[in-house]
Image (spheres, rainbow, N blue to C red):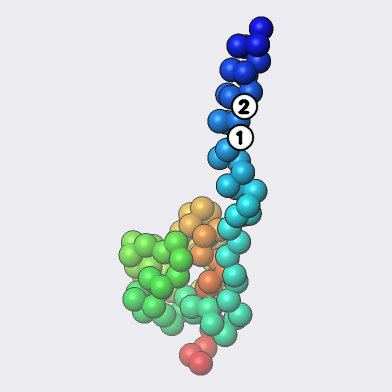
Amino acid sequence: MLRRTVLTALVTAILCVPLLGLAQNGPKIHEVPPPEERVDINHATIDELMKVPGMTASWAGRIVRFRPYRTKQDLVDKGVVTGEVYERIRDYVIAHRNKQ
């Protein structure tokens, strides 16, 4: 009986150790840049788009190819990027109509 109790306590401790690391570090929250620092999907080069976290060369090329956009939501509405990609990049991009 004592052996089983010790074994149960040991297993519980082993399983809880990884959770302690999560509790201490907390969730990773990215900081959203202000609008003036976001990448303009209507005017940015592929290299500029590649600086957006979560962007790939393939998606950047598609964004350039299917311009212009009225809003950044057009990326999903026009099928330029998937919803998953949009979720990764939406806080880092903006769609300006005129060159600034």
- The reply, left or right, for residue 33 in relation to residue 47 is right
Query: Residue flagged by tag 1: what amino acid is it?
Result: Cys
Element at badge 1?
Answer: helix
Query: Residue flagged by tag 2: what amino acid is it?
Result: Thr
Residue 76 percent location from the top left of the image: 53, 60
Residue at the disc numbered 2? 12
Report if the CB atoms under discs 2 and 1 are less than 8 Å apart.
yes
Identify the residue at image location x=62%, y=11%.
4
Q: How many marks?
A: 2
Nearest the eye: 94 or 29: 29
**CA–CA distance in space, label 2 to label 1:** 6 Å
Q: Quadrant of residue 46?
A: bottom left
Q: Residues within 10 Å of mark 1 (few under 14, many from 20)?
A: few
Identify the residue at image location x=53%, y=71%.
92
- One can see residue 92 in this view: yes
Residue 96 percent location from the top left of the image: 54, 82
Q: Quadrant of residue 64?
A: bottom left
- One can see residue 62 in this view: no
Asked if residue 64 is positioned above or below residue 77 in the image, the reply reads: below
Nearest the eye: 34 or 29: 29
Residue at the disc numbered 1? 16
Identify the residue at image location x=48%, y=57%.
85
Question: Quick one: quadrant of the N terminus?
Answer: top right
Name the outermost residue toward the bottom.
100
Q: Residues within 10 Å of mark 2 (few under 14, many from 20)?
A: few
Residue 23 percent location from the top left of the image: 65, 48
Identify the residue at image location x=51%, y=53%.
84
Element at badge 2?
Answer: helix
